[in-house]
Image (tube, rainbow, N blue to C red):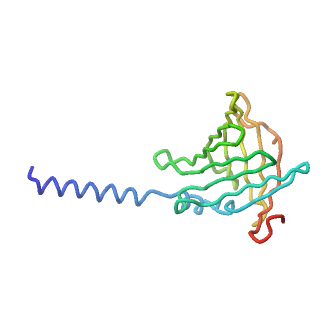
Amino acid sequence: MSLRSILLVAAAMLVACAAQVAAQQSLGELVSENGYDWIIGKWATSEEGEKTEAEYKWGLDKHIILVDVKRGDFKYHGIIMFVPSREEVIQIGADNQGGVWKGTWSAENDSAVYKMEHIRPDGEIRKYEFVHSQVNADTMKVAMYAVEDTGSRASEPRATPIYKRQTSGDPKK
């Protein structure tokens, strides 16, 4: 095979690979196509006098979502991303108490479900499912279910806080 033929084959392979990369779906496209872009923004709720704040914001040209949660002294920072080779949306994160969080997102009816595992600093593992439902443009309900030893979701949620969208002009609203 001549040098020219090798270069032509290499160029054709590069073009084919570049076309595949360009054709891969981003997390932003996936979220928008499935109607879950309403979750992006700042949210807050109060339960038993304690405020919980959550923020979901785009990063890396809508290839990731950055997640921040605060409740009292507890802080969590995570990242949601799409893994094209597995056709899976995953989330990983850590908290300020030494915990590690990991899980997957899926669609269920009109809800976005985060099935997660929390590994505490002492090695204890807790599993939960958070079912995020849009009530209206400014209200989100998050039902928190324990995952039983069988791997299935408990029949009743442990909590179902209602979050209100926060506007940038009035964070206390």
Question: What is the count of numbered marks?
Answer: 0
* Residue drawn at x 69%, y 59% as measured from the top left: 39
Q: Is residue 125 above or below residue 39?
A: above
- Residue furthest bottom as drawn: 169
Task: Give coordinates of residue 165: x percent, y percent.
Answer: 77, 63
- Residue furthest left as drawn: 2
**Of 119 and 106, which appears nearest the observer?**
119
In this picture, residue 99 sits left or right of residue 58: right
Task: Give coordinates of residue 168: x percent, y percent.
Answer: 74, 69
- The part of the image, by quadrant, that contains residue 34 is bottom right
In this picture, residue 29 sits left or right of residue 167: left
* Residue drawn at x 26%, y 54% as measured from the top left: 13
In this picture, residue 112 sits left or right of residue 59: right
* Residue drawn at x 69%, y 42% as measured from the top left: 95
* Residue drawn at x 39%, y 56% as measured from the top left: 21
Task: Give coordinates of residue 90: x percent, y percent.
Answer: 58, 46
Q: Is residue 160 above or below residue 135?
A: above
Task: Give coordinates of residue 153: x percent, y percent.
Answer: 73, 37
- Residue furthest right as drawn: 48
